[in-house]
Image (cartoon, rainbow, N blue to C red):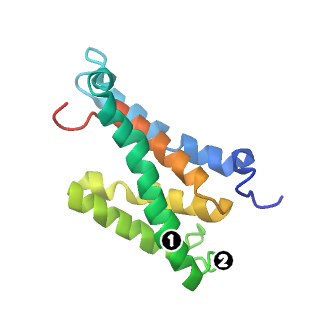
Amino acid sequence: MTTPTAFNWWQDPRWWLAVLLPLPLWGAMVWLSPAWPNVPSYLWIQQAPLVWLNLVILWPVAEELLFRGVLQGKLLQHWPANKALFWLGISRANLITSLLFTALHWALQPGWLALAVILPSLIFGWTRERHGSLLSPCLLHVMYNAGWFWLRPPDGL
């Protein structure tokens, strides 16, 4: 089997596995929520659709362009993706990019929520390297944020 490219990433079973990875977390969030099923948290989207657009589309795409496009792209010139650090195939460029991505989230929201972005970030970076494109990590990031913010509204909403 050949490595998927930017043109056939949707045929990559590993990409679809990455799409499904957050489902158990989201299920646990719903199941453990004290308000569920009485107060659906997704109603906030109707009250603040522009906030939803920012959190689910604009910020994820901007973050991917900056972190996976610019930063990881530059780091890959120095440390090629074929020189993976771990058996999972995580490159040094992906690891450094993901640590910086997590640090940014820590600056915006300290605590476990910031640390929780390290795994998705590594997945986004892995798909960027696997497919040679920013399209698949952008779509994953949008999907992950959509699920997260659908179930966990931003503070104040």
Horizontal side of residue 119 vs 79, given as left or right = left
Residue positioned most to the top: 38
- Residue 67 seen: yes
- Percent position of residue 148, x then y: 37, 38
Q: Quadrant of residue 17?
A: top right
- The disc placed on residue 82 is 2
The image shows residue 91, relative to residue 69, as above or below, that is: below
Disc 1 target residue: 72
Horizontal side of residue 60 vs 19, given as left or right = left
- Percent position of residue 8, x then y: 75, 50
- Residue 85 seen: no
The image shows residue 110, relative to residue 38, as above or below, that is: below
Residue type pointed to by label 2? Asn
Residue type pointed to by label 1? Gln
- The tag earlier along the polypeptide, 1 or 2, is 1
Report how far apart the C-alphas of labels 1 and 2 lie in the structure.
Answer: 14 Å
The image shows residue 28, relative to residue 139, as above or below, that is: above
Query: Around disc 2, counting alpha carbons within 10 Å, would you say few (fewer than 14), some (14 to 19), or many (20 or more)?
Result: few
- The disc placed on residue 123 is none
Q: Residue at x 37, y 64 (%)?
A: 101
Which of the pair 114/47 is nearer the observer?
A: 47
Instruction: Give the number of callouts.
Output: 2
Residue positioned most to the bottom: 78
The image shows residue 115, relative to residue 142, as above or below, that is: below
